[in-house]
Image (cartoon, rainbow, N blue to C red):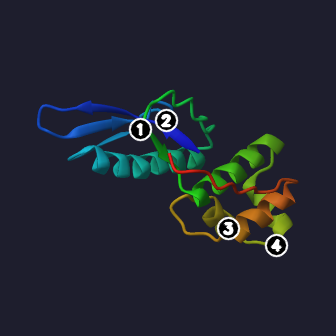
Amino acid sequence: MRYPVEFVPEDNGTITVYVPDIPGCHTFGGDQSEALARAVDAAEGMLAAMIQDGEGIPPPSGAEGRATIAIPAISVAKIGLYQALREVGMEKAELAHRLGWQLPEMDRVLDLNYPAKLEQVEVALRALGKQLEVQVLDAA
């Protein structure tokens, strides 16, 4: 999951970076590299808030030659689980019950800021009739 970014040089020498596909997502850095690193954190934070608020997750638009940021793989898996829950219209409490988990465990699996194990996400996805597929690509 790669989101395109836009850079805006500021008068004070910093660079502001926007993630246009994620409303309100922007940050800055002393240079382009720092701004990109911070943009990943900002994007994950905004996506985590969207999940917590029960909002839809915006898909990345085409990069068309623009710079992009990559959302970490575990977060992409968690976003996929969240989207699968929404797709089937199931509450997370119901999925937790089906899996024999306590609700706080389900909350941690869906929390992008919590280091859940990939296996937990896979188990939850299977309970929804989904499977996780991992793909290795050349670096952008």
The mark closer to the camera, 2 or 3, is 3
Sequence-wise, the earlier of marks 1 and 3 is: 1
Image-based side of 87 in relation to 79, left or right: right
What number is the disc on residue 127?
A: none
* Residue in front for this viewpoint, 79 or 34: 34
- Residue sitting at 36 percent across and 46 percent down? 36
Sequence-wise, the earlier of marks 4 and 3 is: 4
**Residue 107 picture quarter:** bottom right
- Residue sitting at 57 percent across and 35 percent down? 60
What number is the disc on residue 25?
A: 1
The residue beneath circle 3 is 118
Contact between marks 4 and 3 (CB within 8 A): the answer is no
The mark closer to the camera, 2 or 4, is 2
- On screen, residue 91 above or below 107: above
- The alpha-carbon separation of the residues under discs 2 and 4 comes to 34 Å
Tell me which amino acid carries mark 4: Gly
Image-based side of 48 in relation to 109, left or right: left
Tell me which amino acid carries mark 3: Leu
What number is the disc on residue 22?
A: 2
The residue beneath circle 4 is 100
Contact between marks 2 and 1 (CB within 8 A): the answer is yes
